[in-house]
Image (spheres, rainbow, N blue to C red):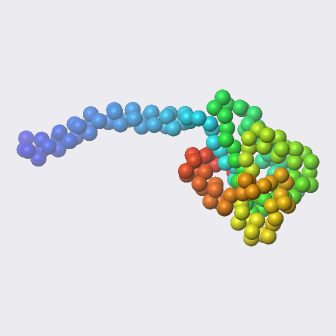
Amino acid sequence: MTEHTRTEHARHLSRRAAMPALAAAAAAAPAAAATPAGRFKVVYHLNQPGGEDFAYYRQMLRNIRNHLSIDPPEGIDLRVVMHGPGINLLRRAARADQQIAATVDELKLKGVKFQICRITLQLDNIKLEELYDADEGDLVQSGVFEVMRLQQREGFAYLKI
């Protein structure tokens, strides 16, 4: 056996010896990632109009209620980030429909944060006072940026209904 052949053989053996350890590490990685430390974090992305009789908003609010009904011991940090036509959940739907307003109130009491895109308000010339139960603390600079930031920097899961 030449020196080159011995070196190649040794490399092959060390790679083969490392394979079980690599396989075990790869198998453990998804399990570790699937077990969150602390609260579950999810962002609902809302950028659509409500539709006839605000059916889309009703369905989204229903899904959020169902989501919270699981009530894991770790807790859930749930955000609804609104921009574009999604702002109309608070601008039109909650102002026009008592049931929608009550559901928004209920969800807020459970800790859901309804975050509003400042750029949408500026571009569409919407005053904060036009939105149901909204204040400066609910504003984010950009809705799309906030969705991205929450996913990439804060580890939030993304949901779009």
Position of 159 compared to 94: left or right? left
Q: Position of residue 16 (x, y in %)?
A: 27, 36
> Residue placed at 73% from the left, 47% from the top?
113
> Can residue 54 be seen from the camera position used here?
no
Residue 53 vs residue 75, the one in the foreground: 75
Q: Quadrant of residue 24?
A: top left
Position of 154 compared to 85: left or right? left
Residue 160 vs residue 43, the one in the foreground: 43
Determine the residue located farthest toward the left in the rendered image.
2
Position of 9 compared to 119: left or right? left
Quadrant (top left, top right, bottom left, bottom right) of the N terminus: top left
Determine the residue located farthest toward the front in the rendered image.
136
| 160 up-or-down from 110: above or below | below
Q: Position of residue 142 (x, y in %)?
A: 66, 62
| 114 up-or-down from 73: above or below | below
The number of numbered badges drawn on the structure is: 0
Q: Quadrant of residue 131?
A: bottom right
> Residue placed at 45% from the left, 37% from the top?
29
Q: Quadrant of residue 13?
A: top left
Q: Position of residue 120 (x, y in %)?
A: 74, 65
> Can residue 73 be seen from the camera position used here?
yes
> Residue placed at 59% from the left, 50% from the top?
151
Determine the residue located farthest toward the top in the rendered image.
73
Q: Position of residue 21 (x, y in %)?
A: 34, 33
